[in-house]
Image: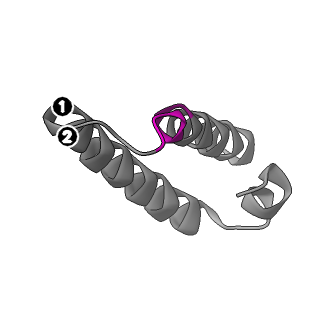
Amino acid sequence: MKVKELRELDLDALKKKENDVREDLFKLKFQHGIRRLENPARLGQLKKDIAQIKTVIAEKQ
């Protein structure tokens, strides 16, 4: 998701989005521990998405 799109969301939607991305990251980390991932770069992308969401939340507060 682009930062421009994130800035259009309200705080509640941003927090829900952050929780969803964190859940996806947890699931991928768990899968990575069991077997190889098809796209291990996805882990880094999810971390980046979380950082962007947290930045937008901080801007709005």
Separation of marks 2 and 1 at Cα, in angstroms: 5 Å
Q: Is residue 28 above or below residue 41?
A: below
Residue 56 inside the magenta-drawn segment: no
Residue at 29 percent of width and 36 percent of height? 36
User: What residue does disc 1 label?
Assistant: 33
Mark 1 Cα within 10 Å, few/some/many (few <14, many 20+)? few
The percent position of residue 13, horizontal first and vertical second, equals 55, 68
User: What residue does disc 2 label?
Assistant: 30
Disc on res. 46: none
Amino acid carrying label 2: it is Phe
The percent position of residue 39, horizontal first and vertical second, equals 48, 42
In this rendered view, identify the residue nearer to me: 3 or 59.
Answer: 3
Q: Quadrant of the N terminus?
A: bottom right
Figure label count? 2
| Secondary structure character of the magenta stretch overall | helix
Which residues make up the magenta segment? 39-44
Query: Horizontal placement of 23 versus 34: left or right?
Result: right
SS state under label 1: helix
Amino acid carrying label 1: it is Gly
Q: Quadrant of the C terminus?
A: top right
Q: Is residue 18 above or below residue 51?
A: below
Residue at 85 percent of width and 56 percent of height? 4
Q: How is the image coloured?
A: one colour
Residue at 19 percent of width and 40 percent of height? 30
Q: Is residue 58 above or below residue 7?
A: above
